[in-house]
Image (cartoon, rainbow, N blue to C red):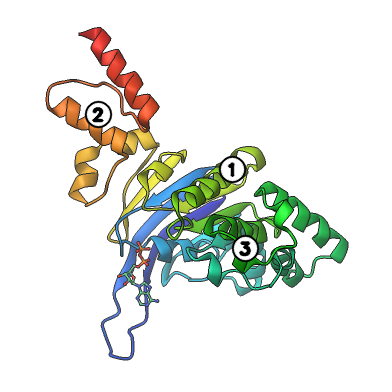
Amino acid sequence: MEFIDVRDVVFGYEADEEGKENKIVLKKLSLSINKGEFVALLGHNGSGKSTLAKMFNGILQPDEGQVTVCGMNTLDEDKLLDIRKKVGLVLQNPDNQLVASIVEEDVAFGPENLGIEPKEIRKRVDDALKAVDMYEYRGHAPHKLSGGQKQRVAIAGIIAMQPDCIVLDEPTAMLDPQGRKEVMDTIVKLNKEKNITIILITHYMDEAALADRLVVLDGGKILTDGTPKEVFSNVELLKKHSLDVPQSTELAHKLSSSGFKIGDTPLDVEECVEAIDKALKKK
Ligand code: ADP
């Protein structure tokens, strides 16, 4: 059974006070995500990524079609708490997610709300802070931390609820390069070492290239779905929809179109150097 199954989902936000027309945002969208996958959701602004992210744990519910998490339907009110225990959501701005004045209290907030025993909470908080490499900051004030550190504390707060899946909606958008790296390293580690399913919304193609699978949305539908190499090899399709590819992929594509044929689709600098080297040796 799929871990998350989105089936023929149609969704539109209610018309606002000005009576603007109810625009359909998700258009009969279907998508299955398996346990342990690392999926990056791409698409330009307004393509429906955040709306879809909120469908995964029942913050939003479909107008038509259905979303199930481990077979539990998000339309079933009785299952919502169980669904939210399984699928945690991390948002763009860590400042909006941190609520307490000490790091470890912040991380304890989620499990406290789930009614977990204090002894168990203590253990979960320590484990979660260790998993994001923030244990030594447990007694610090969150507002004094760097952006990357704050976002890692926000992720620890989700991990402490022991979800099977974490959905991250542009978690690095407000961070500097160092913070972005810290958060991406954490996400990859949680996926590879703890087998937590990751769904990452990002505008950074180098981050997307770290995923096992890319799902590209366009106008509330899936434009393409495949491994990073499969998706990024279709440079023309992505460009047509105003989407970027990693810089190394673009360089290789440009070299190929100007006659210097590169067989592979490199996703980073090392792969690009290797591909150019291979092509030179063939000449
Ligand atoms: P993305 O995350 O890909 O940028 P969103 O899911 O945020 O896309 O938005 C999809 C569409 O839904 C956009 O046209 C956006 O303006 C609209 N939208 C998003 N949130 C709301 C809301 N709360 N109320 C009304 N319309 C919204």
The answer to whether 161 appears left or right of 180 in the picture is right
Crowd class of label 1 (few under 14; some 14 to 19; many from 20; radius 10 Å): some
- The mark closer to the camera, 2 or 1, is 2
Name the residue rendered at 33%, 34% in the picture.
230
The circle drawn on residue 91 is none
- The mark closer to the camera, 2 or 3, is 2
Name the residue rendered at 61%, 57% in the picture.
155
Examine the image and state in which quarter residue 126 appears: bottom right
The kind of residue on which mark 3 rests is Ile
Examine the image and state in which quarter residue 233 appears: top left
The circle drawn on residue 83 is 3
Location of residue 222 in the rendering, given as x and y in whole percent from the top left corner: 33, 52
Q: Residue furthest bottom?
A: 17
The answer to whether 275 appears left or right of 237 in the picture is right
Q: Which element carries disc 2, helix, strand or loop?
A: helix
The residue identified by callout 1 is: 191
Distance in Å between CA atoms under marks 3 and 1: 19 Å
The residue identified by callout 2 is: 252
Q: Which element carries disc 3, helix, strand or loop?
A: helix
Name the residue rendered at 37%, 25% in the picture.
271
Location of residue 136 in the rendering, given as x and y in whole percent from the top left corner: 73, 52
Is residue 1 visible to us here? Answer: no
Q: Is residue 244 above or below residue 143?
A: above
